[in-house]
Structures are given as C-alpha cells and as structure tokens.
Image (cartoon, rainbow, N blue to C red):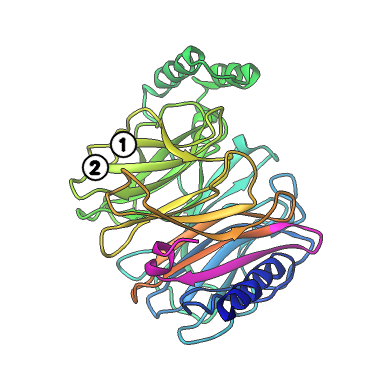
Amino acid sequence: MMKLILRAVIASAIVWAGFADVPVIHAEDGSFQSEPLFPREKKHNHASCIVECADGSLLVAWYRGTGERTADDVQIMGARMEKGAKAWSEWFVMADTPGYPDMNPALFAAPDKSLWMIWPTVLDHRWESALLKYARADSDAGPKSPNWTKEGVMHITPGPDFAKQLMRGVEAIRGENVKINETEVKAIEARAKDLLYQRLGWMPRVHATVLPSGRWLWPLYCDTYSISIVAISDDQGKTWRASGPIIGFGNIQPSIVRKNDGTLVALMRDNGPHHKIRLSYSKDNGETWSDAVDSSLPNPGAGIEATRLANGHWALIYNDLSRGRHSLAVSISTDEGATWSATRHVEKHEQGQGSYHYPSIIQARDGRIHISYTSGGVPAGSTIMHASFDEAWVLKGD
C-alpha cells in the first residue's frame, strides 16, 4: 500500500512539473532528478544543448525570443551548474547578432578542453538564408559565459556532384508509395544547382563526434533541400569541409554514433512522410553516406539525439510517437542500435497537456546521463528542463 501511495505522489509531482517549475525526484530508486533552468515565461525558449565542461560544470545553451526565425530579438542564451552545486546560474547571453535571429546552438567540449559553439543566424526570416557561425573558447571553465577567443563563419561547400545527387533523391521519393508535398519537391529541383542555396541554410542540432583518428564530425542539415550533411575537420577545427550529402527526402538533424567495427550510424529526424527515425551509414569515417532508410522507431517530425555510453551501450532520447510531442522517452540498445531493449519515459502526458522536445543528451565522466529539453505547450509558457539519471534507471523501464 505504501508503494502505491508513493507512486501516486510521484505521478502527481510529474504532472505538476509539466505546468509549474517544481523539481521532480523519483523516490523509488533515487536515481532520477529533474529541474527547470528558470521559471516558465511567455518568450519562446527552445533547442537546447548540454555539455560537461573540463572543470566538471554543466553548461546549457538555447535560444530565446518572441518567436523563431521571424523574430529579430532571438538570442543564444546559456546557464551553468557548477560542479557540486544544486542550482543553475542565472542565464546569460552567449551570442547575439543585433537585429537578426540567432538560433539552434550546438555545443562541443573538445578533447583539448576548448569549447565550441556553432549556430545559424537567419538573414531574411527564412531557414534557407541561415548563415552558419562558430565561436571557440580556449577554456570552457566557468563561471558564466565562455570567453570566446575566435569567432567567424563556418563555410560549408557541397561537392560538385551535389545537384546530381539531390535529383536522384527527388526521383527516389517520387517512386515511393508515400504522400509528398509536390510544391516543396519542385522547389528543391529549382534550387538544386543554385550555389547560393547550396552554401547557405546549413544548421546544427547536436554535439560533434570525435573519431579515434582525431577527426571531428559535426552533423548539419538544411530545410532548403530537407537533407543532411556532415562538416569534417582533420585539424581540430582550423578548417572544415563537407561530406557527401545524406540523400533521402526529409532526413534532417542527424546524430552520429560509432560502432565497434568503425561504421558510423546517423540517426535522423524525419521531416517528410515516413514518421520514422531515419538511418544512414558511413563506412569511410564520414566522407560518404548511404541513402536514408526507415528505422523501426517512430518519429513525429521532432528532434532526437543518440550517444554511445562508456560501456558501449547506446542511449537514444526521442519523442516515441508518430504524432505529437507529449511523450519523451530514453531507450537503451545493447547491440549497437539493432534493437532497443529498454525504454523509460522522462515525460508522458495526454495530448494537449504539454510539449517536450528537442532533447540533448550526454554521459558525464562519472557515468551519469544528463539531458536537456524544451518544456512548453502550456499557458504558463516555456522553459528548458534538465534531468539526470543513470543507465540502470532506464533499464528498469516505466
């Protein structure tokens, strides 16, 4: 009876956490805790990314403004939780281009203890005009905003066969037995050979991946063509070049995980008609990628992220729905993504009672898993949530 009462109290706390800024602790095992970075507000807070810094602090970046790409007051914000602290700092500005929306920050705590952030500045209120920028700090130590020592534009130039590959993808989607937006597909055809469209519009969503060779891979996507590409650096970020594109209409926002045999797997949001997490593979360290295919996991057109844990297992955070964003789950794979044997929900509500999406996931050096995500869709407004747990919490299931 006591356990049933305790579960009822926990469930009540979770519901309240969806509408107010109440920390949630699962008392049954003590391994899960969750809290907002700041009280809910009417401004739009979205697209967070979390990293563990060299000094053990946690840093989260997100964008905040009166809207998204059409709102010129959108800034990149940040907040820290110092190592051993119980609360997040007040937020601070990490990037701001006056008069333009800065969006979708992606953080990278590099092996040399530098901190990187890339993000798009939207030039004309359309995603197609996004200008990809970067900032680098020699040290990622706190207490507040990083001291950026180098900033600039990250130029991404697709290869000479880009247009031909795009058109092959267009023909492939027309050959599928799925409903497509023909107007959007025709726009892709019209822009396929336009160099300005090819070189603008690239945006990040998740962390960079470091390969055993030292190569850095930072996955990117664009809404211009509704496909993905990977930025490659073999000199610790001094220069970047583009991989071959991931072809398959509607694959965006890839997250890269490496298998033991060296195969790279990109798990992607579906921005098209499939309603499944999409997959692509690279056998040459990210230079080229296979055409996107469906996984067995649902996707409602919302962001995901996967990471390889220290024990070789994979962790995936995603909206486990074909429609809506009112359920946010973490799944574990012990066989490198072939199956996902355990799932537990971070948020699960009735449709219309909240929106929990655009998650970011890392494993800290102490083995604990940390996530951040958007919490909105309620009258009180939006906030960015942080939660932490261990793998055993996920393996126990709901």
Residue 18 falls in which quadrant of the image? bottom right
Determine which of the numbered discs, if any, sits on residue 281 in the image: 1
Nearer the N terminus, badge 2 or badge 1?
A: 2
Q: Secondary structure at mark 1?
A: strand
Residue 19 falls in which quadrant of the image? bottom right
| Image point (30%, 57%), residue name | 313
Q: Taking 69 as reference, is 165 above or below it? A: above
Image spot of residue 70 (x, y percent): 74, 44
Q: Taking 40 as reference, is 172 above or below it? A: above
Q: Residue furthest front?
A: 1
Is residue 394 or residue 153 the one in the foreground? 394
Q: Is residue 311 left or right of residue 362?
A: left
Is residue 147 or residue 310 the one in the foreground? 310
Q: Are marks 2 and 1 in contact (CB under 8 Å)?
A: yes
The magenta segment is 376-398
Q: Taking 237 as reference, is 31 above or below it? A: below
Q: CA distance from mark 2 to mark 1?
A: 7 Å
Q: Residues within 10 Å of mark 1 (few under 14, many from 20)?
A: many
Amino acid type at circle 1 is Tyr
Amino acid type at circle 2 is Thr
Determine which of the numbered discs, if any, sits on residue 263 in the image: 2
Determine which of the numbered discs, if any, sits on residue 55 in the image: none
| Image point (30%, 66%), residue name | 111
Q: Residues within 10 Å of mark 2 (few under 14, many from 20)?
A: some
